[in-house]
Image (tube, rainbow, N blue to C red):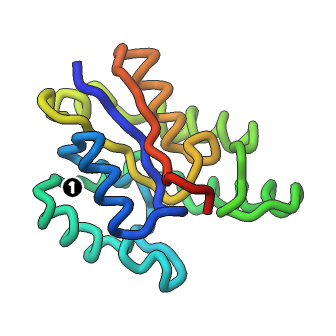
Amino acid sequence: MPTVATIGVYGFSLQSFMETLDRADVGLVLDVRQRRGVRGSQYAWANSLRLQAALREARIAYEHHKELAPTTELRELQYREDARQGVGKRTRAVLAPEYRARYIAEILDAVDLGAILERLPNDRKSALLCVERDPQACHRSLIAERLAEQYGVAMMHLRPATPG
C-alpha cells in the first residue's frame, strides 16, 4: 500500500520545499488546487509551470487533480468564516465545520479515490499539494483522512521547519 503525504506551500522556499520532498522520498505530487497560482513574489516558485519545471528537474512526477479542488463557492465560504474569526488564509488553524461538511458531500464523495490510489507509485511516496501551511487548515487533510479511513493508506504531513 502506498504512503501519501500532505504538503502546503506557505512557509517554504523552493529549495526547502524540494529538500523536504526529497527527504520524504516523494515521487509524485498530486496538486489539488483549483487555481494553481499563489499570490506574492515569495511564492512565485509554486505557480504551476515553475513548480512543474522544478519537479521535473528533480524527477518527481506531477498530476493536477482539479476534481479534488474546492469550488470557488466553497473557498468563499471558508474566507467568510476566516474574516468572521479575524484570521487570514495564511494563519488559519482549522477548517470551518460547514466548509468541511460541504467539501466532503459535494467534492470528496463524488471522486473515485480508489482509481487515483491505483495509479500511485508503491516504491515512493506521493504528496497531496495545496497552499496552506498546516494540513488541518486545508482540504488536503480531508482527502488524507478519507484515504486513511477507507483504504488504509499510511499518511504523513510534511511541514516547513519553522512557522511562516
**Residue 36 vs residue 60: left or right?**
right
- The single residue placed furthest to the bottom in the displayed view is 41
**Residue corresponding to mark 1:** 62
Indicate whether 90 appears above or below 134.
Answer: below
- Whole-percent x, y for residue 15 in the image: 33, 67
Q: Is residue 153 left or right of residue 95?
A: left
Q: How many marks?
A: 1
At horizontal 37% and vertical 37% (from top left) the residue drawn is: 5
Residue type marked 1: Tyr
Query: Looking at the image, which is closer to me, 32 or 131?
Result: 131
Give the position of the C terminus as an image quadrant: bottom right
Vertical relation: 53 (above or below) 12 = below
Viewed as shown, does residue 142 lie left or right of 63? right
- Residue 119 lies in quadrant: top left
Q: Residue 86, position in %: x, y?
A: 87, 62
Q: Residue at x 65, y 63 (%)?
A: 90
The image position of residue 96, as x and y in percent, is 74, 43
Q: Which residue is pictured at 49% across the width and 43% down the height?
A: 140
Q: Nearer the viewer, residue 45 or 150?
A: 45
User: In terms of depth relative to the viewer, which is nearer, 99 or 7?
Assistant: 7
Residue 134, given in percent of the width and then of the height, sits at: 59, 47
Q: Is residue 136 above or below residue 42?
A: above
